[in-house]
Amino acid sequence: MATAFETGEASALLRRELAGEFPDARGRFGPYGGRYVPETLVPALDRLADGVKRWLRDPAFVAEVDAQLANWVGRPTPLSPAPALSARWGAEVFLKREDLAHTGAHKINNAIGQALLAKRLGARRIVAETGAGQHGVATAAACARLGLPCTVYMGAVDCERQAPNVGRMKLLGATVVPVTGGDQTLRAAIDEALRDWVSDPNGTYYLIGSAIGPHPYPYMVRELQSVIGRESRAQMIRQAGGLPNAVFACVGGGSNSIGMFHPFIGDRDVQLIGVEAGGRGPALGDNSATLTLGRPGVLQGCYSMLLQDENGQIQETHSVSAGLDYPGVAPEHALLLSAGRVSYEYATDDEALESLAECCEAEGILAAIESAHAFTGARKWAAGNKGAKLLICLSGRGDKDMPTLQRTLLKGKL
């Protein structure tokens, strides 16, 4: 059977992606991406796009980012063999340990890069949104490091289920604003951060936490997070003797996954598999599986895959993991789905919690609930690919999830 590399429109999209043609001058990844924003934000986005074009390839700026990643964030993060999981699954399992980065997740890679860029652009204050709280913590830490005032918007529901991270943000000097409107989760937090930014687009910098939003954010976040995949690729060759047969990452907004996948896109023999939040099941409102169950539309500045009803109304989502509880996704993931280069599936709440428990008991690692979705996908894939090498992006640690775990896995055991 011919593959997506070889046939039709999907092949053309993939060739353009591999040639570095996306995003184009309009900020589009094929049909996805672009800008859908109020006119008041266009000058700020133009300044940001000019700054991204100037600074992200400037040797002095790159050296400054690299120094912060090495000396403060703790990069490169380790590539850990997982011997117990390997024995259980019948495959060689390797974990990219983003949980060991400063602040406990991949979010810091993007936060410090954007905060440094914001200073170059003359920003006087930073606003951000957060769901699971890891981006909020990372932004608060980066702003403290660079001496920038920081306000973080967080849905009231997420404030409750991610209480440890709310406290961390406040200790790091950030102002945390609970959002009580809308669905009170990540989508509502993004809406409030956008309103704040619109009120002062010149002095305020909006530090988006995922590869979503209007151009140039999806491109910029991908570039800053691709350090994950670049390191992983080199580490696999050095430590495992070659590239993995398959790479797995959880997908919410999509920053850890696009950062992991992008450096592997040209490796034809490496399967790339994103795992979304299947929640309670496939019915609309019971999950956050945007790529698997959604359809195209516009949300919060860009055109991508969304969870919406037949009238185009964005629907509330559900996931046991706050960081995956979002009805949209990075436009580059939508492109990679259309091009057939990445496969997307979902893991339910119960499956993710089961995988989290297995990783704890087998490897002595408390993964974030978000990351546990990727473990579920990897375990299922390994069942039909015995002896293969697989790589999982362990995007964050699970300390933040203890309130949820006490109500689920630990219920009746305390």
Image (cartoon, rainbow, N blue to C red):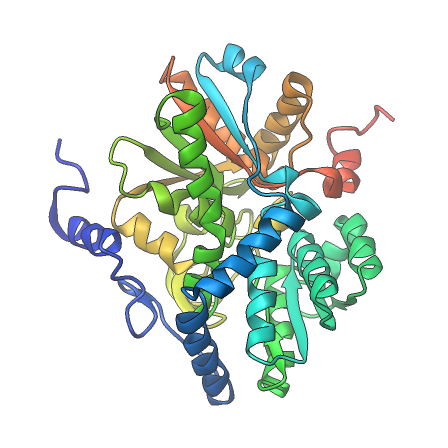
Return the residue found at the far bottom. Answer: 40
Residue 131 image point, x, y percent? 65, 56
Q: Can you say whether 365 is above or below 200 in the image?
A: above
Q: Quadrant of residue 196?
A: bottom right
Task: Look at 45% across and 36% down and name the residue there.
Answer: 232
Q: Is residue 241 left or right of residue 278?
A: left
Q: Quadrant of residue 174?
A: bottom right
Whether residue 156 is visible to the viewer of this picture, yes or no, is yes
Return the residue found at the far right. Answer: 414
Q: Can you say whether 349 is above or below 243 in the image?
A: below
Specify the quadrant that holds the C terminus: top right
- Tell which of 131 and 168 is nearer to you: 168
Q: Can you say whether 206 is above or below 413 in the image?
A: below
Residue 73 image point, x, y percent? 64, 48
Task: Look at 12% across and 49% down and name the residue there.
Answer: 8
- Tell which of 5 and 56 is nearer to you: 56
Residue 225 image point, x, y percent? 49, 52
Q: Is residue 232 left or right of residue 280?
A: left
Task: Look at 63% across and 21% down and name the residue there.
Answer: 358
Whether residue 310 is visible to the viewer of this picture, yes or no, is no
- Tell which of 268 and 282 is nearer to you: 268
Residue 185 image point, x, y percent? 66, 59
Q: Quadrant of residue 387?
A: top left
Task: Look at 55% across and 20% down and name the residue there.
Answer: 82
Specify the quadrant that holds the N terminus: top left
